[in-house]
Image (spheres, helix red, strand yellow):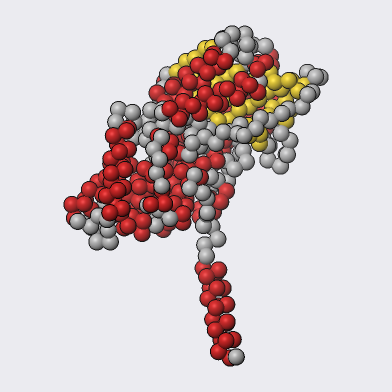
Amino acid sequence: MKIRLSLLLIIICATATHVIAADPTATTYSWTDCQGSAKPYPAPTQAYDYPDTLTPVMINHVGRHGARYPATPRHTSTLLKALRLANEQGTITARGRELMALTEKVVTYSDGRWGALDTLGMAEQRGIASRMLANYPMLFGSNTVEAISSYSPRCIMSMYEFTHQLSRLDNKVELRTASGRKYSPLMRFFDGNPDYSTYRKSDTLAATIDSYTRANVPLNALYRVLGNKFSSDMSLPDVAMAEYSVLAGLQAMGLDCDISRYLTPQEYNALWGVFNLRQYLQHSTSTLSAIPSDIASPLLLDIIASTDGFISGDNTSTVHLRFGHAETLMPLLALMHLPGCYYLTNYFDTVGMHWRDFQVVPMAANLQLILFRSDSGRYYLRTDLNEEPVTLIPGDTSIYVPWTKARAYFDRCIPLYY
């Protein structure tokens, strides 16, 4: 009896120790979600009705480009360099040779198309356009749609796919499209802002990202492909993150792969968490700096101006489309403090539980600010993130917010120096 009791106590103690040792901040997101910002667009499964007393009169749409080929060959080059070195050293595993062939396939598919919108990305934009027209047909017809894009080809192509679909479905609509570097202050403000440039080059940001990366990147997955005896002066955490980027971006470029052949769910979550934190610190408000989101102020001011102009009658365009990047939307959504897009903490290991790039900026992510007019003539604003209504003002559960109240809130979001 005493032996049985002792064994039971040992089991209980071992179980308690395991529970205590478990990381409470570890995430368990799905294979799909761990693609992060490379996750293909999660199209909504239903349309959202609005009260009979409200009539849609205008939409401001800010969208990210659709799914694309890898933006640059940087990650494939880093991963291939390590895999080929392991092959030369004779340490590479069978799984490593498989990964090397897959990475070479990515390079072949992307040759001449780095960063280009692919067929999936085109379909994503057409789908969003189709649903917009189906949900708000009164805003099209003979009305004017104005669209602008950053100078990036994948953003321009996203704009053209979107507007082309509108014209296919309603050939009476008047379309005005424009793109180029003159729109960079609105769509690529992250390129030319000196304060942001200084922040990106700061030792504080670099040290924070580096320490978190080294503490959280699981290297076992890398050794399973490179071999335990692999030797190199390459930064193994950087190689591991390159492997993550290559694998996470496969579906967006139309390649199928069983990620579990290379990573466990825990490893994929850990690698995603590192990448997610990098995006959070670089492009959202954090305790390190508010600059990454403050620089989106010109875009929010433009949205305010276009809405005010429509209400006053100075601007008759019913639909305003803007096409940019994940780096356009992340700051804007944080500036607006939208749910799930704004999170402040000194404990960066909790970021992945509250700020998730796959929810904030999947491929073709978009913000739609829909203006309604009531029977009494008052204007109301509904805020949709990725075509799902969200609350606009923290602490206020209203989905339909009087424009005067929404505008006052936007004014408070924008720093005084803008």
Picture residue at 59% right of the left edge, 43% below the top: 340
Q: Which residue lies furthest to the bottom in this view?
A: 2
Q: Which residue lies furthest to the left in this view?
A: 88
Count all numbered tags in the image, as a single digit.
Answer: 0
Q: From what the image shows, is residue 315 above or below residue 203?
A: above
Where residue 184 appears, as percent x and y from the top left, is 45, 24
Nearest the viewer among 279 and 121 is 121
Q: Is residue 13 left or right of residue 88?
A: right
Where residue 231 appears, as percent x and y from the top left, is 23, 58
Picture residue at 61% right of the left edge, 31% below the top: 387
State the quadrant of the N terminus: bottom right
Nearest the viewer among 200 and 265 is 265
Q: Is residue 198 visible?
A: no
Nearest the viewer among 174 and 214 is 174
Picture residue at 30% right of the left edge, 48% below the top: 98
Q: From what the image shows, is residue 128 above or below residue 170?
A: below
Q: Residue furthest right?
A: 376
Q: Is residue 400 visible?
A: yes
Q: In this view, does 87 lie to the left or right of 64?
A: left
- Tell me which corner region of the image, top left, top right, bottom left or bottom right, holds residue 201: top left
- Tell me which corner region of the image, top left, top right, bottom left or bottom right, holds residue 132: top right
Where residue 312 appears, as percent x and y from the top left, is 69, 14
Picture residue at 46% right of the left edge, 25% below the top: 122
State the quadrant of the C terminus: top right
Nearest the viewer among 397 and 5 is 5
